[in-house]
Amino acid sequence: MHSFASLCLLALFASSDGSKMGPLGTILLDSIETCPDIVADEVHLSTNLQSIDSDTKALFANISTNIAIDDTITYKMDIRKWDSGWKPEFVHSGTLCPDINQYAPNLWKNFKLSTRPEISDKCSLEPGDYTIEMFQSKTKDFDIPSIFYGMMRVKIVAMKGHKEIACIVIEGNSQAPK
């Protein structure tokens, strides 16, 4: 699902009252994978995070959706931080497209440029098959006040009503600005 790649990055930037957080710095992604415990018929997603050079990675993905991804899609995001085990840090629920527009305004533009066939300027995805190639994002693409620092794991479950339609887990290392 197109927005999962976007939200994977967004999830690392969620704000909270935790003690080890601050302004956006650098995010080094280690993995982006589908959730093994959730099987959904509506949206099929395969991901491949590839190293481009020593400090740059890009997402390649295939999305096949039988339903429209639009303002009716909600999500639940569970952020965990590594501290001798994955410890709960922050949980958030919201509506997918409005949250992307609010917290990651430039992310959709970058995603649109990486997706074939072409998609709308508006945050939406019609039923069909899509390929994402060389999708990259920078912290400047996000509009959030603060970020957790350290090794993070984020699970994002997308829902249509109360039905889970897709899920993705990302892991990465969030670092303070230098």
Image: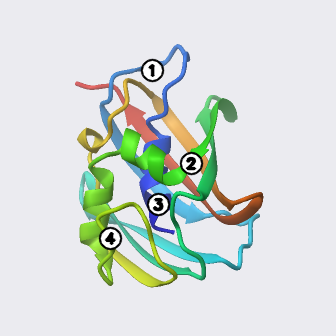
Q: What residue is disc 4 on?
A: 120
Question: Marks 3 and 4: which is nearer the front?
Answer: 4
Going by the numbered disc 3, the residue's amino acid type is: Ser
Q: In this view, does 32 lie above or below 27?
A: below
- Percent x, y of residue 177: 27, 26
Give the Cα separation between the discs numbered 1 and 2. Answer: 25 Å
Q: What residue is disc 1 on?
A: 21
Figure quadrant of residue 149: top left
- Percent x, y of residue 94: 59, 43
Pointer 1 or 3: first along the chain: 3
Going by the numbered disc 4, the residue's amino acid type is: Ser
Residue 136 at least partly seen: no
Q: Answer with left or right where residue 86 lies relative to residue 28.
A: right
Pointer 3 or 4: first along the chain: 3
- Percent x, y of residue 55: 25, 51
Going by the numbered disc 2, the residue's amino acid type is: Thr
Figure quadrant of residue 161: bottom right
Going by the numbered disc 1, the residue's amino acid type is: Met
Asked if the residues shown at circle 1 and circle 3 are in contact, with their CB atoms under 8 angstroms apart, the answer is: no
Q: In this view, does 5 lie above or below 22?
A: below
Give the Cα separation between the discs numbered 1 and 3. Answer: 25 Å
Q: What residue is disc 3 on?
A: 3
Give the Cα separation between the discs numbered 1 and 4. Answer: 35 Å
59 or 172: nearer the eye? 59
Q: Which residue is drawn at 52% across and 57% down?
A: 71
For residue 29, the mark is none
Q: What residue is disc 2 on?
A: 95
